[in-house]
Structure formats: C-alpha cells, structure tokens
Image (spheres, rainbow, N blue to C red):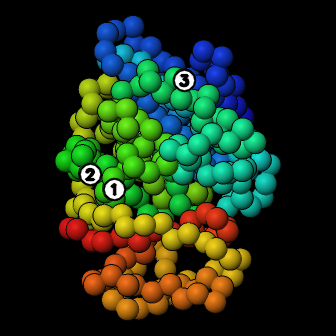
Amino acid sequence: MKDVYDIFLKNSYNSILGVTVIDSGKPGKNIGILGITHGNEPVGLQVFDFLVHDFKISEKLQKGKLFLIANNIEAYKKYRESKDPNAYRFLDNNLNRITHQTFQNESYEHRRFAELKTIFHEIDTVIDLHSVSKGNDIIGITDKKYRENAKKFFNVETILIDDVSKTGAIIGEFLRKGKQGYGLECGNHISHDGFEKGKENVLNFLGFFGYIQQKIRKNHYDEIYEFIEEIRVKTKNFTFTKKVGEGFTKIKKGEIYARDGKENLTNTFHQEIFVGIPTKKPIIGDGAGFLFFKKQ
C-alpha cells in the first residue's frame, strides 16, 4: 500500500484525525467524499490521492469546501497489516449500520462516529465510497427522495434505492438532517477497474453539483433495484444454496436461497426477488448480502 495514503489518516480538522479539507476560497455550500467506512475497502483513499495529487482539485474547486474523510482509520490500519483482503471490515461494530443506534463507549466505531458527527453538520452533500468482496459490481446507492439526481450523474450499471434515512448507514445521518447522501460500490476490493470507475463517478458527482467544471460521462443503462432487507448471519454455518456472485441473482417465489445453521432462508414474498452484493466471508451478526425487488 502506498505510504501517501497516510496523509489522509493523519490530516486533521478541528482536532479530528482523518479529515482533509480543501477550501476553494469562494462562497458556497460544502461537499464531502467519505472513504474506508469499512477498513478493507481502500478505494476511497485511492480516490482521495487521485483528486489531490493527480487531478489537482485544489486548483479546480469552484465553490465552498471539499471534505475528504477517512472514516474507519483503525480498521484500515489493521487491514493494511493483514494479508487477507477481506479482513478487518470493522473492529467492533459495522460503522455503516450504527448511526441510528444508542452510543456504546466500548466500541471503537461508535466512538469514531461520535467524533465525525461533530463536523458532519458542515457538509451539505456527500458520497460514501465502498467496494465489494465478491464479484466486481459498480453500483450507485441513493435514497428514494434523490433517485432522479442519482440517475443523472451515476455512470453505473445498477442503482439501488432505499429509505436510507431510516437506516444506520453513514449517509443516513446526513439524510436525517435534510442533506443529500449517496453511496458508490466501486467494484471489487482489489480491482483496478473499480478504482477507475470510482474516479469517473466521483468527478461526475462533483461536476453535477457544480464543484468542478466537468462534463457528465454516462454510457450505462441503469437497472434500478429497491432494497428489501439485509441478510443477517446468525451462525458460523451460513452458506448460500443458490449460486451468487457478480450481478444480481434471481430468487423465485418459494425458492430457498441460503441456509443458516439449521434454518433455510426462503423467498416468502409473492414475487421474485434478487440477492445482491454478497459477502465472501459472512460474519455472525453482520450481513451476508441484501435482498431486492427489481424496479426497472
């Protein structure tokens, strides 16, 4: 891993580590890009490095401030020392599930989120960068309220919609405060193509909201899926009985798609559903993937 990423872990704002602020010196609302919400997803840091050192964002920012925030610093440090690309998604709790929960002082992720909340109020629009452990999907994520905006700037094959403001996602915190929040799955953890797609979509995002002069690049037809629920893992013997991988896997009405210990997980809805974003190594208490309805 490049040492240059350490800059984004050590930079601070209001005494909070992991925050890099680029000020245009011009009036305007502030925009944010979040990375390493999960420690084993370094694509956010790669995009930060590109924006600062290659794209020269400090010379091109048209208004307000740009916040580059490394969310889960300690999990990332552990991941960087590990040889397992799927290790150290988090230390104590999934940072992308807890933002609507009661504070737990014994949890690193809860303490880190409490820190970050003190500066989140300065940001008006945000995108959170992720990657996947299985497959190589490029996926945009949006709240239902901002679906039309997402369709205009995401250059992806798939857009997921949800009532994100009701969830424990990081971007849910922004949406609950009346701000705009989006997510992006930039392909596989170790995919260079995912990094390239991440760059392209971040530039589209900054251009769409008027922070840089950028023509929106869009050459994909968007498939739209609506979130139903997360597949939560209860035992160490969880396995998908349906072959899942890249893309979204169709599950017929009444079909068994996974087994968790002695329990069969079955499509109990009155229509076909889809499994998406499956996890390569499911962890008890965390998600193994998600269920969706296809909308378009």
The secondary structure type at the circle numbered 2 is helix
Q: Where the N terminus falls, by quadrant?
A: top right
Residue 162 visible (yes or no): yes
Instruction: Give the spatial CA distance, label 2 vs label 1.
Output: 6 Å
- Confirm or deny contact between disc 2 and disc 3 (CB under 8 A): no
The circle drawn on residue 162 is 1
Q: What residue is rendered at 58% in x and 25% in y?
A: 19
- Confirm or deny contact between disc 2 and disc 1 (CB under 8 A): yes
The circle drawn on residue 118 is 3
Instruction: Give the spatial CA distance, label 1 vs label 3.
Output: 26 Å
Instruction: Give the spatial CA distance, label 2 vs label 3.
Output: 26 Å
Q: What residue is rendered at 43% in x and 21% in y?
A: 122
Mark 1 neighbour density, 10 Å: few (under 14) some (14–19) many (20 or more): some
The secondary structure type at the circle numbered 1 is strand
Q: Position of residue 57 (x, y in %)?
A: 43, 23
Q: Position of residue 279 (x, y in %)?
A: 57, 68
Q: Mark 2 points at which residue?
A: 144
For the residue marked with disc 3, what is the amino acid? Thr
For the residue marked with disc 1, what is the amino acid? Asp
Q: In terms of depth relative to the viewer, which is nearer, 66 or 181? A: 181
Mark 2 neighbour density, 10 Å: few (under 14) some (14–19) many (20 or more): some
